[in-house]
Each structure stands twice: as C-alpha cells, then as structure tokens.
Amino acid sequence: MSIATRKEREKAEMRTRILSAAHDIFKENGYDGLNIRSIAERIEYSPATIYLYYKDKNEIFFALQYEAAAAKRDHLLPAASIEDPWKRLVEFGRLYVDFGLKHPDWYDLLFLTRAPMEHIENQECWSLGMATHAFFVETVQACVEARYFKSTDTATIAYTLWCHAHGLVSLFVRERMRMYPPEERGELARKSFAMIVKMAESL
Amino acid sequence: MSIATRKEREKAEMRTRILSAAHDIFKENGYDGLNIRSIAERIEYSPATIYLYYKDKNEIFFALQYEAAAAKRDHLLPAASIEDPWKRLVEFGRLYVDFGLKHPDWYDLLFLTRAPMEHIENQECWSLGMATHAFFVETVQACVEARYFKSTDTATIAYTLWCHAHGLVSLFVRERMRMYPPEERGELARKSFAMIVKMAESL
DNA sequence: GATTTTACTAAACACTGTTCAGTAACTTTG
DNA sequence: CAAAGTTACTGAACAGTGTTTAGTAAAATC
C-alpha cells in the first residue's frame, strides 16, 4: 500500500508543480504568454508529460481560475466580519474594486477571458465564485431587511451594484479608459465608487 | 492616369472584399473562427494575398472594430434628436444596453477583446468611439446645467452611469450571469436599468 | 530473475500568422 | 509591336501554438 500512496502523492505533487509553474508564467507574461511548452520547460519535463497530469490546457485554465477565485475570496474576507450590513456592503464593494485594480490579471481571468467556459458551472472555481456572490446578495438582503433602502427588490439592487463595480473594473482592466489621463483614473474610480454609494443610500 | 486610378480603385475594392469576408466570418464564427486562411478561402485568393492589402491581422481587426464602432454610433443616433437632455440621456443609455445585448460580438470587439490595443488611440475606431463618448458626456453636462441633478460633477456622473451600463452588458456578453436562469436575465437587465435611472434622478 | 506496469519523451500532426522566392500577366518603353 | 520593367499573385516554407502516439527505460509485481 505504501507504494501506491507514495505514487498518489507524487502525482499530486506533479500537478501542483505544473500549476505553480503555470501560475508564475501567467503572472510574468499574462495568459497570452502561457503555453504548454513554456510550462514544460520551467518544470524541466517534456510538453507531452503535462498531458499525463492535466487533460488539456483548459483544465489548467480552470485550475488557475480557481486560484483567482480563492484570491478574490480572501481579499474580500475582511468585510465578512463587519456587523452592520450597510457598512459591510460598502466595504465589500470597496474591496471588490480594490481587488480588481490591484490584480487585473486575476480579475481578467475570472470575468473577462473568453477561453473555455463551456462547462464552467461544473468547475470548482464556479462554486467558489457562487459562494462569494451569495454572500454579497445576503448582505444586500440584510440591508433590505434592516430598511436601509426604500426598495425591497434585493436581486435587482445586488445586480445593479455588481454591474457598476464590474463595469468600473472592466474598463480599467481592458484599458478602455484612455480618454482620461492615467493619473486621473484612480481618482475617478474612487469618486465614482463614492457616488454609487451615495446613490444606493437614497435607493 | 486612367490606369493608375483604376488600379487604385481595384486596390480599394480588394480591401473591401477582404474586410467584407472577414465581417461575414466574424458574424458566423466569432473572432476565434476568424483567421487569414478562412478569409483567403472565402475570397478565393491565397492567404499570402491578404498581406498585400493589409499589413497584418491586427489591421483587419482594427477595420472590423471601426465597423463595430460605426454600428454602435448608428444604433445610438436616434437618441441624439431628443430635445430634453434627461430624456435624451435615458434613451441613450437604453439604446447603449440594447446594442450590447443585440450585438454581443460587436460589443465584445469594441470593449472586451484584448487583441492588439497597442496603438488603438491612433486608429479611426478610437476617434469614432471618442466622439460617441463625447456626445454622452455632453448630454450629462446638459442635464447638469438644466439642474436635473443635485451633483454638478459631470465627469463622475457620466463615468458612473457608463460603468453600470458597461458592467451590465459585459456580464451578459461574457456569460457571467449563469447564476440567474436565462429567462430571467433580460428582465433583470431591464429592472436594473430602470433602477439606475431612478438612482440617477435622485443624484 | 522474468513479466507487467508505469513514467516519460521524441517526433509527429494539425492548426495558427507570416514571409519570400518565383511566376505569369499587365504596363511601359523604344 | 517586341523588349523591358512592373505588378499581382501564389506555393512553399518557417515559426509558434495545442495535442497525440509509438516507443523506451525504469519501477513494481510476480
């Protein structure tokens, strides 16, 4: 039995090593610079070996996406411990935007990369993202119940706020904000976030 | 001189034919299915010929992006003739979202595709997009001047509204709304648009 | 120690964007 | 109108992708 468990462990280690290499390359060169041969070279194995541990490049993509989802969850975690639902919601939003601006590549991977997607619902990263989203909706629900808004349409409120935050980050990440000078962009983002908070208060 | 002008005309015609083929393939198979060989096959020339009329694939990409920008401008045009700035702004927003949901591929090309971008500011599509954006900002400015809002920060108001609309469309286009059943998504988008309008009224 | 199973790889395939030498038709020149 | 020059085009190749397969050497089992 010892040999079998060792082999299992070695298999897992190799998967980790591959993913870790993919992670590094992704951070250094983005998703475009990430290819099977570059991973193989970094772990000092032949390209074909990769396929003994991952079905195809998509599977590696999904594994990376999971890491991104985990990083995002960890980034948002501090908000969870805030008692007051409104303050929690605001901090959640602030951290969401903060994550996107600090880690554009991760955000890109999670929300903007086209890539596989075919069966993303079956991937672990999806359930992780769903959990984070559920937490967000619950916080909005808590605000609704505590009568922080006039409106009681939790789903629409949550979705509207998400649209704004996602739009804000997306315009940054895909660099469609070039009509504004670089040094003004951060300021504009902060002002816009403050504005949507103000708007939400009078919702 | 007649020969020279004929050649010029033929050159322009060929460019048009290439772009038109690229357009069709893009609409049929998306940007992923669009490659030089497929364009060449459709116009019944060899792949190498493409390079006599376009420097590289990026140049074709920019030309397509220009078409998308023009299509978007045309889609938004009806709003321009509305006198009342607030009604114009709302209709502009409605048409913007409408365009994104009706032509996800065009929207993707304009705002979500990574692709070249290096010198997009130098491309025609950029100035076209800038003009459309300027019209949007002017409309917001007109609303501010007509005291439709309490706030007078035109730039931030415009940007905030854009973030929402862009986020809304992006989540659709890149299919990150799968937590909502397909038949509810359209309704949710409409409700959210109505909500941001209401929020803006009390801005 | 012989046999089976495992881990790995070299080489290839199919598909991309792109380049280049060569050719055939067209245009200009004498 | 024939020779020379120019232009439009292409076949074949190169380099870079993801992926598969046949073969091999080491490890595990018997």
Image (cartoon, coloured by chain):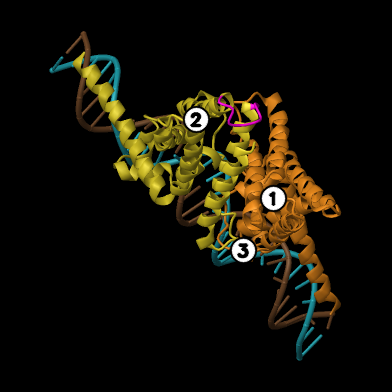
Chain colours: A yellow, B orange, C cyan, D brown
Bounds of the magenta segment = A146-153
Q: Position of residue A107 (x, y in %)?
A: 49, 42
Tell me which label, 1 or 3, sits earlier in the chain.
1
The answer to whether residue B185 is seen in the rendering is: yes
Same-subunit check for callouts 1 and 3: yes
Residue at image position (66%, 56%) is B152
Report how far apart the C-alphas of labels 1 and 3 lie in the structure. Answer: 26 Å
Report how far apart the C-alphas of labels 2 and 3 lie in the structure. Answer: 43 Å
The secondary structure type at the circle numbered 1 is helix
Tell which subunit mark 1 falls on.
B
Q: Nearer the viewer, residue A35 or B161?
A: B161
Residue designated by label 2: A85
Q: Position of residue B133 (x, y in %)?
A: 70, 57
Query: Is A155 located above or below residue B41 in the figure?
Result: above
What's the residue type where badge 1 is placed? Ile
Disc 1 crowd, CA 10 A, few/some/many (<14, 14-19, 20+): many
What's the residue type where badge 3 is placed? Glu
Report how far apart the C-alphas of labels 2 and 1 lie in the structure. Answer: 55 Å
Residue designated by label 3: B121
Q: Position of residue B2 (x, y in %)?
A: 86, 77
**Magenta segment, prevailing SS (helix, strand or loop):** loop
The answer to whether residue B44 is seen in the rendering is: no
Q: Nearer the viewer, mark 2 or mark 1?
A: 2
